[in-house]
Image (cartoon, grey):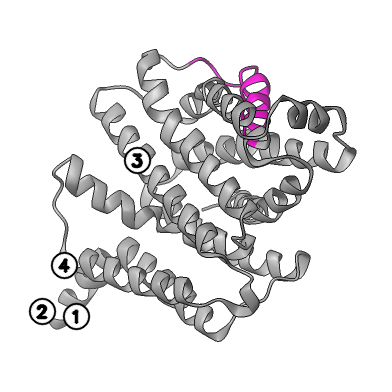
Amino acid sequence: MTRKDMLLALAIIVAWGLNFVVIAWGLDGLPPMLLGGLRFLIVAVVGSFFFKRPKTPLKWWFWYALPISFGQFALLFTGMELGMPAGLASLVLQSQAIFTLLFAVLFLKESVRPYQLLAIAISAGGLAFIALSNSHHEMTAIGFGLTIAAASSWALGNISTKIIGQKGYHANVNLVIWSCWIPPIPFFLCSWFIDGPEVITHSLLNINWSTAATLAYLSIFATVGGYGLWSYLMSRYSAATIAPLSLGVPIVGLTSSAILLGETISPMQWIGITLVLFGLLMNTFGGRWLKKISQHTA
């Protein structure tokens, strides 16, 4: 990678890692469903000016957007509202890689390799350590459970992406942006029934500069800018080079949450974090490691 592209990749990782701190700030000013609906509405309005409408049939927009945009973030935002710390959320959400592997075996009949099974077991053990820890009651069981559910919803979106590709269409940044017209509908409906029209009206009429800046960051910088730059890097380099960079997101998320939100992590949680990251690394690089080992022993 060129120096400029390395800096762009670093900027994306930092932006996506800080995303969780910004979500926590946003939830101080808006209820979860309203925050989600406004975020994706802004993405759709702004992004549509910069990205072409995808040729993917409309029904696949729904199959993509409902799990990966609505499901994932409705569950994540609610989980963080109900006690999931931002830093741990940034890590636990990365378990989507493990869920994607499991769903690919279940729904697409893909094969799984022994090192991937080991990676699943290690990551699952790490998540168990995190789930069983509760330093100063900072993390709630419901918050953790909803974040796990958010990761599984993201994984279902990944399966939709694979199917869209198998149908001969491109599940690229254009689909990401234009499909954002869909999630505001269920988000706003959920907000209407959960929060009520009075809360919605009061929240909208009392949006301050801090909340507006939060929405701008989540929609324009983290989504339109982040996915736009990510698509640019994926078009220039192999997926094997770019995809593993996302492993830096929870590192930034954990660090920024500790600095900006004062979150603390217990020793048991650090054990879980280490196991999850090692499992994700094994899932990503296990094939290369085994190949190198076989070459050295041959």
For the question of whether residue 3 can be seen, the reply is no
Q: Amino acid at mark 2?
A: Ala
Q: Residue at x 44, y 70 (%)?
A: 277
**Mark linked to residue 296:** 1
The alpha-carbon separation of the residues under discs 4 and 3 comes to 23 Å
In this rendering, the label closer to the viewer, 2 or 3 = 3
Which portion, as a residue range, is magenta?
Answer: 36-53
Whole-percent x and y of residue 227?
Answer: 56, 38
Q: Name the residue type under label 4.
A: Pro
Residue that numbered label 4 is attached to: 114
Tell me if residue 57 comes above or below residue 131 in the rendering: above
Q: Nearer the viewer, residue 232 or 49?
A: 49
- Mark 2 highlights which residue? 298
Question: Residue at the location (72% across, 25% down)?
Answer: 197
Residue 103 vertical placement versus 200 (above, below) = below
Question: Whole-percent x and y of residue 244?
Answer: 43, 57
The image shows residue 224 at horizontal and vertical percentages of 62, 33
61 sits to left or right of 296: right
Which quadrant would the C terminus be assigned to in this image?
bottom left
Residue designated by label 3: 156
